[in-house]
Image (cartoon, grey):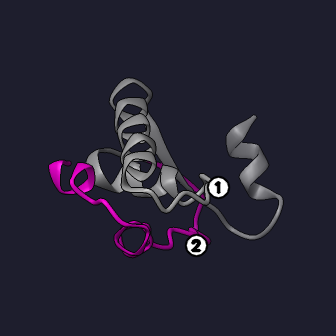
Amino acid sequence: MSNLRSCGSIEAFNELVGKTVAKGSENKIVPIAGAEAVRALLRNVLFFAREPEFVRMVFDTAIDFVARVPVRRLTFTPDYRVWEMLV
């Protein structure tokens, strides 16, 4: 994840954070870790800083978070069946 920590610009940040919408033909929960987990988390973080120090602080916080909290991707069918799995 050092490449994430060294990202110092908003442009590089936007490039690292990719799409991970997960609709599928079956319901499943899959653990994700490392850089993939950081990218998934950062996709949901709203911030407008352009200063490298603030961008770095956001990256560091996200990296620390995924190191402590298990991250999972929920893939789901676009109907009621996902609730059966979650309940």
Percent coordinates x, y for residue 85 in the rendering: 68, 44
Q: Which residue is mark 2?
A: 24
**Given the image, on which type of amino acid does mark 1 rest?**
Leu
**Residue at disc 2, secondary structure:** loop
Task: State the separation of the CA atoms marked 2 and 1.
Answer: 26 Å
**Given the image, on which type of amino acid does mark 2 rest?**
Gly
Q: Is residue 4 magenta?
A: yes
Picture layout, residue 82 above or below residue 60 = below
Percent coordinates x, y for residue 55 in the rendering: 42, 52
Q: Quadrant of the C terminus?
A: top right
**86 or 56: nearer the eye?**
56
Percent coordinates x, y for residue 28 in the rendering: 53, 53
Which residue is most to the top? 68
Crowd rating for badge 2 (residues with CA inside 10 Å; few <14, some 14–19, many 20+): few
* Left or right, residue 77 beside residue 13: right
Please state the extent of the stretch shown in magenta in the rendering.
1-30
**24 or 9: nearer the eye?**
9
Q: Quadrant of residue 47?
A: bottom right
Residue, x 62% and y 71% (percent of image)? Answer: 23
Crowd rating for badge 1 (residues with CA inside 10 Å; few <14, some 14–19, many 20+): few
Q: Quadrant of residue 24?
A: bottom right
**Residue at disc 1, secondary structure:** loop
